[in-house]
Amino acid sequence: MTHFCLHSPKKTVCHGPAALVLATGAALWACPDQLAMPPAFALGWKPPQTANMQQPKRSPFGSEHDPQVAATAFPGMHDRRASGYWQMMTVVGTIVAAAQLVQRRTVAQSRARVDAEKAILVSISTACASACGPSVLGKGLTGADVPFFAVRGSAAAGVSARGAKLVVKNGGWTKRGPYRLYRNEELYRKWAYHKKGLPSQQFRKCKEYVMHLLKSEYKQRRVFKRTQRRLWIIRVAANCKLHGVRYSQFISHLYRNDIILNRKILSQLGVYDRSIFTNIMNLTMPNWQSQLDRKMNPPKKEGSTEEMDDVVLTHIEKKFPELYTSPCIRFNRRVRGDSLEYTVDVGDPDEWRKLLPKSPELANFNLPDHFVKDANLQREVHSLFAVMKIRNEDPLDDEFVKAQKMYAKKLAREEALAEAGEPVPPKKEGMSRDDWFDDEPQSWY
């Protein structure tokens, strides 16, 4: 049989109507002599005689107060010893019956409360029940019928005066307790069970791996945000450049016009719906079209054709010292509208003859723009004419100095071949700067 009892912080107690029954029974059991004696208001009653008085007649039962003698002395009274016993049992039985009714009602109420609050019942073995005392006395009631609560907290929360419902937080999972080490180990192993090698086998390596993993994840979450922000800025800046506006200028005007759009949304608009981005640009900077036109069509402040030829041809001659003597170089010049075009092809003539039929775009003046220009560059920071002019006046230009050294080594090698009597590579004769202006272009065929 399993009993349920409440462990008080100080002592073992028993609550409810059962306590009342126990108290009444103990009181009646402790003083049977008092119940057997006649009451003080009984007419003609005398106290029992002492040793100095005449000894009363003893009954066969050995009692000092023989009921037959009492009946003879007091004819108007009944047998109080016999009737007192049944009276006591009647009172106790009435109290027990009332206790059962009250207890059943209490059980029903406590069960409803248990279902509502999901309280936890603490079962005690029979050995413990003998030390704590029975929880319920009465016919038909067992400990399983009465859900006592082993609790801390409010005394009025349970079915007894000292009890309170058991408050379980987080499913009983606490940071401290007798099983804290086991719980911590289980937590670490949840993060490392998939890892091959020692982290999934040894707890020490598992803990080291998990600590490094969590630190790395903490760091990578912030690195990811930083990287995404950089990507958004790059995309927004690219869309701003298509509209002729700087990124910093665009963001500044957004704040001035109280347009609250973050960089992520702006980058997505530029990728998936550029027309909406253009509408935002119209609200932010209405004059963006004039800026774009000024950058796409900058004013030309170049020199005359003679000055252009002088600067560009000087630059080419310094870059190719054997321009007019090597048979492996072809050069041409063409005037197109207001601009001049120059081409220089270098390589083995036989290889060029094989390559040009396969790739005709490599012929003179057929190179696509992306071969010679930066497609992302809207305008030149410095004019090519000005750059060449500055480099021509610099005697220590790295590119020119390197070309002169290579040309000097080639001449020294040819002289060594001539002294050794070996054949020397052929050279062109009679070529000069005037050949740039010939009407017929040079060809590899």
Image (cartoon, rainbow, N blue to C red):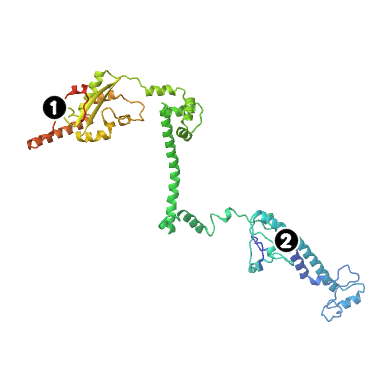
- On screen, residue 83 versus residue 142, left or right, reads right
**Which class describes the residues within 10 Å of circle 1: few (<14), some (14-19), or many (20+)?**
few
- On screen, residue 70 versus residue 328, left or right, reads right
Amino acid identity at mark 1: Glu
Amino acid identity at mark 2: Gly
* Residue 440 horizontal/vertical position (percent): 21, 23
* Residue 232 horizontal/vertical position (percent): 44, 35
Q: Nearer the viewer, residue 442 or 269?
A: 442
Residue beneath the point at 27% across and 31% down: 362
Q: CA distance from mark 1 to mark 2?
A: 129 Å
126 relative to 254, above or below: below
Q: Which mark is residue 16?
A: 2
Q: Residue furthest bottom?
A: 60
Secondary structure category for the residue under label 2 = loop
Q: Does residue 196 appear in the picture of this structure? A: yes
* Residue 165 horizontal/vertical position (percent): 65, 56
Residue that badge 1 annotates? 429
* Residue 192 horizontal/vertical position (percent): 45, 54
What is the quadrant of residue 203 in the picture? Answer: bottom left
Q: Which mark is residue 328?
A: none
Residue beneath the point at 78% across and 69% down: 28
Secondary structure category for the residue under label 1 = loop
Q: Does residue 394 appear in the picture of this structure? A: no
Residue beneath the point at 26% across and 28% down: 364
Task: Give the number of the mark in front: 1 or 2.
Answer: 1
